[in-house]
Image: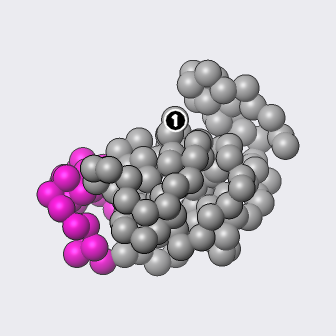
Amino acid sequence: MKVISVKQPWGSLLVSGLKNIENRTWSTPYRGWLLIHASQTGMPSYVLSNDFQKNALKSITNNGNSMLPFSSIIGACLLDDITFGVDGDNRWSDKNCFHWHMSRAIKFDKPIDMVKGKLKIWEFNLPEKYEEEFITKSKNKNYVFSKD
C-alpha cells in the first residue's frame, strides 16, 4: 500500500480523524488510501498555532499523559483532493502550501513499530493481520479494499 511519512503530532491527529488537512510543499496526482507513518522525529509543541490545535493534541494524549508512537505505521486516511493556498477557515491549513484533504481516518489498534520512513509517497507491504484490520475498519467506512 502507499504510505506517507508525517511528523508527530500531525500523524496521530490525522489517524484520529481530528486533523483533515496535511500541509505539503509538493503535490501528487495520486488519490486514494494512504497508510500514515509517524516519523522518527516530531515537531515541537509550539508549532501548534492555536487553542483548537492544542486541545486536539490534548485529546489524543490524555492531556499529555500518553506518549505518541514514532517510527511506526499508525493507521490510514483517504486522500480525497489536493488544493493550494488558503482553504477558507480550515484550522489545519497553512498558507502557501499544498493542502492534502484527508478523510475516513483509521487508527490501527497497535502501531507497526520500527518502520523506517521515506520521502514522498512510498510503498509498504502491510502484514496480513494489519491488512485484515484495515479491511474491517475501511469496510465500516464504505470502502472496498484493493491491492492496486
- For the image shown, how many numbered marks are present on the structure? 1
Does the segment drawn in magenta span residue 63? yes
Is disc 1 placed on a helix, strand or loop?
strand
Looking at this rendering, what residue extends furthest in the right direction? 148
Q: In the image shown, does 73 or 103 lie closer to the viewer?
A: 103
Could you tell me if residue 42 is visible in this image?
yes
**In the image, is 95 to the left or to the right of 34?**
left
Q: Nearer the viewer, residue 26 or 66?
A: 26
Q: Indicate the position of residue 31 as horizontal and vertical percent values.
A: 68, 47
> Residue reaching furthest left?
51
Q: Is residue 139 above or below residue 118?
A: above
Q: Nearer the viewer, residue 106 or 94?
A: 94
Asked whether residue 76 is in view, the answer is no
Note whether 21 is above or below 33 in the view shown. Answer: below
| Of the pair 31 and 95, the residue shown nearer to us | 95
List x then y, in percent, for residue 30.
71, 52
* Structural crowding at the residue carrying mark 1, measured as other residues with C-alpha within 10 Å and reported as few (<14), some (14–19) or many (≥20): many
Q: Quadrant of residue 51?
A: bottom left
Q: Residue at x 58, y 47 (%)?
A: 81
The residue carrying mark 1 is 104
Is residue 59 left or right of 121 when viewed as pictured? Answer: left
Q: What are the residue bounds of the magenta stretch?
A: 44-71
- Residue 65 magenta: yes
Q: Position of residue 66 (x, y in %)?
A: 29, 57
Q: Residue at x 63, y 51 (%)?
A: 35
Please provide percent x and percent y for residue 75.
Answer: 56, 47
Residue drawn at point x = 51 percent, y = 46 percent: 102
In the picture, the quarter occupied by the C terminus is: top right
Residue for point 52% across, 68% down: 24
Q: Name the side, left or right, on which 19 lies relative to 7.
A: left
Q: By what rule are the colours in the image chosen?
A: one colour
Question: Hey, what amino acid is under mark 1?
Answer: Arg
